[in-house]
Image: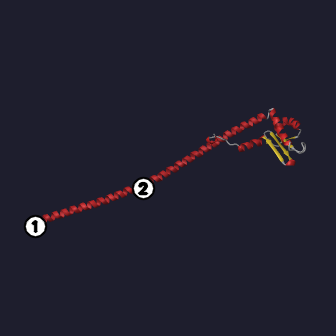
Amino acid sequence: MTTEEKLSAFYMNCLTAATEEAAHLTADHKAALEELYQEHVRQKKSQSASELAVRREELLRESNRALSEAQLKSRRALSARTQELKDQLFAEVEKRLEEFRHTPDYTDYICNKINKALKLSRDRENDIIVYMDPADAGIMEEVSDRCRVKITETREPIMGGVRAVIPSRKLLFDFAFLDLLNEEKEAFAFKGGPEHA
């Protein structure tokens, strides 16, 4: 073999070896890059999932806070409206009580309550004290005559009605409209809604 042929064979062997090594290095590099790419994709997916979960939590908290504020606002509005209706209702009751006080039935009502108290009294003249509102001065004499008891005016207005005290038995009969109305206001609650249907 001539030197030129040897050089040509050597060149071809070197070229083949370099090409094979370049192909091998390229494949290794390509595999390494593919692995880096896949790792990068996994990290980005994990990061995106974490960010999405955090954002979802933030949105859920914001939604819950907004819902809570809306519910609180609704409750306040409902409470205010309920109080307004309750005030209107009891203003109407007070008006009707005042109208009732100017009827003959009112005198009968007072006498009926006094007679109930008298049934527990031992002595009509000394064992019972009957109190009426100063505004009822116009019917006190009639009530006193009908029930045969002395009537005492209260120091403070009681919106009508009557109170009777039996000291010997330590009993108080409180049929003062003011007290009865206040008791009703305290105990009153609107009933309604699907659970009361």
Q: Badge 1: how crowded within 10 Å, few (<14), some, or many (20+)?
A: few
Q: Please tell me which residue is depicted at 22% across the width and 62% down the height of the picture.
A: 20
Q: Please tell me which residue is depicted at 18% across the width and 64% down the height of the picture.
A: 14
Mark 2 and mark 1: Cα distance apart in space: 64 Å
Dot 1: element = helix
Q: Please tell me which residue is depicted at 70% across the width and 38% down the height of the picture.
A: 89
- Relative image position of residue 52 (x, y in whole percent): 45, 52
Instruction: Identify the mark nearer the N-term, 2 or 1.
Output: 1
Q: Quadrant of the N terminus?
A: bottom left
- Relative image position of residue 170 (x, y in whole percent): 84, 49
Amino acid tagged 2: Gln
Residue 91's disc is none
Q: Quadrant of the C terminus?
A: top right
Left or right, residue 7 beside residue 118: left
Q: Please tell me which residue is depicted at 81% across the width and 32% down the height of the picture.
A: 104
Dot 2: element = helix
- Position of residue 59 relative to residue 151, above or below, is below
Left or right, residue 160 beside residue 48: right
Residue 47's disc is 2
Q: Badge 2: how crowded within 10 Å, few (<14), some, or many (20+)?
A: few
- Relative image position of residue 166 (x, y in whole percent): 86, 46
Q: Which residue is mark 1?
A: 3
In this view, the residue in front, 103 or 77, is 103
Q: How many marks?
A: 2
The quadrant holding residue 71 is top right
The colour style of the image is secondary structure
Amino acid tagged 1: Thr
Disc 2 vs disc 1: Cβ atoms closer than 8 Å?
Answer: no
Q: Quick one: which residue is furthest to the left in this view?
A: 2
- Relative image position of residue 179 (x, y in whole percent): 77, 43
Left or right, residue 141 beside residue 35: right
